[in-house]
Amino acid sequence: MSTTIDVETVKQKVIEMVRQAAITRVGDHSRLDGFELLELSDTRAAGEVLGNWMSIILVTGDAIRITLKLHFSSSDAKAVSHVVYGEDSPNGVSDAKAEDFVKELSNLMAGYIVKTFEGMNIPMGISLPLCTRGFYEVFADYVPTESPLIRFSDLWRLEYKNRAISGTVMIEISNPNALDALCDFDLDQDDDDDSEFDFL
Amino acid sequence: MSNINQDVQASHKILTLLETANAQTEQIIDLLPGIFLIFNDKFDILRGNNEATQVLSAHKETLLRKSVSDLFRTDIWEVFQQNLKLLDIAGNESSKFELPIKSFDRKAKEKPYYWRLSRLKDHNEVEGNLYTLLGEDISQLRESESKLMNVFSSIPLGIMTIDEHGDIEDTYSSYLQYLFNVNTISGCSLREIVFDPIQKDLTGEDIKGIDNIYVSLNREEQFFESLKDSFPNQIFLYKGNNKEEGKHLGFSYKPVTYDGIVKRILIIVEDRTAIVQAEEDQARANMIEKQSRAIYESAIRDPLTGLYTRFYMEDQAEALINNHNRHSISELSLIIFDIDHFKPINDTHGHDVGDIVLRQVAGVLLRQVRKTDIPVRFGGEEFLIFLPGNHQAAQSLAERVRKEVEETDFEAEDKVIPVTISGGVAEHVEGELLADLIKKADRLLYQAKKGGRNQIVSAE
């Protein structure tokens, strides 16, 4: 196959897709309006410790692998989750529930990404989300490359009234040609289906 | 269910277990005793345990990205950085050091901490090298040490160690400066401080013992023990010729071994000056007592015969008479002896022979009397015996003495001298004075002399 793919476009589309997953799913999951997605790439770097807690999930297929990390503090997670838990204030949310909220959020984001790829006939798998405390993200070594794998990252922050969940997305593309469909993908055609992805 | 689904299920299970294990590990880190921190090249804290949040007065969430430098005063922080540099330069896995942390309560004192700094093998492009820092609050240990040092300082003992070269290394009591009368001890050699000032007084044995202290260093403990008894255990230390302010110092030696080799010697120095002076005082007192006793003995014992003197008799006979008057003893008698023809013995054979006769007659008396009797040389060749008992008992004793004297061959200067004695026996009557009793017995003696000598006359 000698099709020339615009790699930069593919990369940009992946980034946009993940961002779209993040901003839509956090709003749906928290039932809060007014979340904003702010870029962090200028001030932070992938591999940096951005929070006391981290939820990590892997979306993987033959051509692409996306590692999505959500960095958060327990207090911020409580602040953005108390509504969905039916609590009057963040204090009503336990630490465990706050962790579950972010784990579920990463799960929903990954589900959105998988579903989007599947809409382009690109089959993808998904891991369970893993939530850890501490500094483990520093061991997820990351160096941007263009060959043989195309490796790049995206950093952003989901902010709601001075509360934030930071996201680090590490993307590895092994076969950009297989992602050809992405170039014509229109993010606005999101079907607004907020159904959760059913993983095993 | 397909095999793929089973594999995915298994992976999910492993992931769940991993997450639980991680949670447990993090909880253990939280509860680690002391301060535990993980920080990066920029000294940003990436992880801290519960105690670190307390010490840094930071919430767990705000501890992230605080600087390790917040723990220390500026000058101490520089020392910390030096330790970190040394760790990087030396390539060691960890280094240990003691530094105090500043208190967030301005009134409180800084607390000493013992730190273990390590570099993790993994590092990250962004965070750089990662380090762990474990800090243990040793303020209580230091307090205990301080109390112990106060105890050391207050007891009249000097405690020090000498190193493998024989130089004084650690001193645990400022009392040592007083004992050795010097301002600086640490770093000086033991010989210089302790033994050189009195070199002229040291015996060959002392010098050999001092040499042995040095010889025993860096040798097996067994070898040390074999030499230990030769080490000087007491000296008299003084400066110049000022012996009046000198001190008697006692030494004891304990080996400090590493792998069985004596690398240090713990020396305990005791000021024995007071003890030695007390011993000398005691010896003087004993001497005086001995001399006094000798003087007293000479006062109460006749040096020639070993019999009691009149001086002693007056006290003791009075006591016996009082006892008799108070019925403490039922009967009391007195015998008075006189050697017959003693003057011709003196005149014929000389006073030396006379003295021998006196001594031998006294020997007969001493052999015949009981412990309760009081034999006395009354004067010249006259002897008395006071005895608890009636005149018959006294008569019997007097007769035994007389008979033994008569039967004894008195030998002096290769001559046999016939000796006899005469005696008078009187029993004390209640209320009778000592002088009267003696006079009564003396009259009976006179009768014995008049009756032909070598006989005893007793009052009925």
Image (spheres, grey):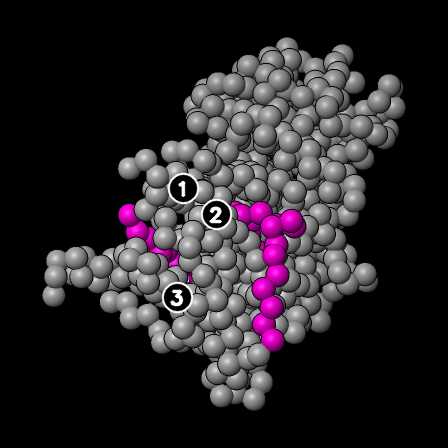
The chain to which mark 1 is attached is A
Where B319 sits versus B400, above or below? below
Where B286 sits versus B44, above or below? above
Q: Neighbour class for label 3 at 10 Å: few (<14), some, many (≥20)?
A: many
Local SS, label 2:
helix
Local SS, label 3:
helix
Q: Quarter-wise, where is residue B79 in the image?
A: top right
Residue B73 in percent (x, y) is at: 77, 48
Residue A149 in percent (x, y) is at: 39, 38
From the viewer's perspective, tell me whether residue B425 is left or right of residue A185: right
Residue B182 in percent (x, y) is at: 82, 28
Amino acid type at mark 3:
Tyr
Q: Name the quarter where the C terminus of chain B is drawn.
A: bottom right
Can residue B89 be seen in this snapshot? yes
Q: Distance between the residues labelled 1 and 3?
A: 24 Å
Can residue A95 be seen in this snapshot? no
Residue holding disc 2: A9
Residue range in magenta is: A34-62
Along the line of sight, the residue nearer the viewer: B168 or A184: A184
Along the line of sight, the residue nearer the viewer: A7 or B94: A7
Q: Residue at x 81, y 24 (%)?
A: B238
Residue holding disc 3: A112
Amino acid type at mark 1:
Ile
From the viewer's perspective, tell me whether residue B388 is left or right of residue A128: right
Q: Distance between the residues labelled 3 and 2?
A: 20 Å
The chain to which mark 2 is attached is A
Q: Which residue is drawn at 65% across and 45% down?
A: B43
Q: Which residue is drawn at 57% across and 25% down?
A: B90
Q: Neighbour class for label 1 at 10 Å: few (<14), some, many (≥20)?
A: some
Asked if labels 2 and 3 touch by Cβ distance under 8 angstroms, the answer is no
Residue holding disc 1: A5
Asked if labels 2 and 1 touch by Cβ distance under 8 angstroms, the answer is yes
